[in-house]
């Protein structure tokens, strides 16, 4: 297992909030957004979203552009190139991962209309 895979396991299987973090990351991948937009789209508390974004940014899974409240989040090239590893790991670990992904995708589609 390479170091990046170990990081994914720790962030998305071995820690509290793994499924929420995965939902936030999927939403950012679908469309770059700021924390407020993510909070509204996912129906999550703003501070919860900010926490998960900080964790993802600290571990180089997301990048930012802009500053303060308008800061947009983007999936990093490293995360994008390893997306299949993440999805495979989520299928193995988070119960109903595919259902969670479908739910997130529906939220994204509904908010994009």
Image: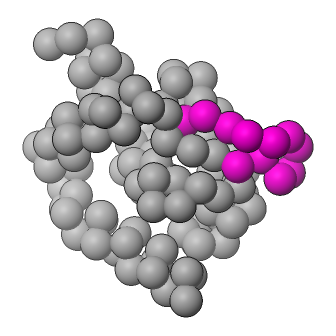
Vertical relation: 19 (above or below) 10: below
Residue at point 28%, 32% (across, down): 82
Q: Is 44 on the left-hand or right-hand side of 15?
A: right
Instruction: Determine which quarter of the picture holds residue 62.
Output: top right
Number of marks in the image?
0
Q: Is residue 97 magenta?
A: no
Depth order, front residue of 68/43: 68
Q: Residue at horizontal 56%, vertical 82%?
A: 111
Image location of residue 8, percent across then percent down: 32, 28
Residue in the image at 59% along x and 23% along y = 58
Residue 100 occupies quadrant = bottom left
Q: Is residue 27 left or right of residue 4?
A: right
What residue range appears in magenta? 62-72
Q: Where is residue 77 in the image (x, y as percent from the top left)?
A: 44, 32
Image height of 21 relative to 108, above or below: above
Quadrant in the rendering for residue 88: top left
**Residue 68: in magenta span:** yes
Residue 9, position in %: x, y?
A: 27, 27
Q: Which of 59 and 21 is in front in this view?
A: 59
Instruction: Report the side of 109 relative to 50 (left or right).
Output: left
Quarter in which the N terminus is drawn: top left
Q: Is residue 66 visible?
A: yes
Which colour style is shown? one colour
* x then y, percent, for residue 14: 31, 29
């Amino acid at each position: 297992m390479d170091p990046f895979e170990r990081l994914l396991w720790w962030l998305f299987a071995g820690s509290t909030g793994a499924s929420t973090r995965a939902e936030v990351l999927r939403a950012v991948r679908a469309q770059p957004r700021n924390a407020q937009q993510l909070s509204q789209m996912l129906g999550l508390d703003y501070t919860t979203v900010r926490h998960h974004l900080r964790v993802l940014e600290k571990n180089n899974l997301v990048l930012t552009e802009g500053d303060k409240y308008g800061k947009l989040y983007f999936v990093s090239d490293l995360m994008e190139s390893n997306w299949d590893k993440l999805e495979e790991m989520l299928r193995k670990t988070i119960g109903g991962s595919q259902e969670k992904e479908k739910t997130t995708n529906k939220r994204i589609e509904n908010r994009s209309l």
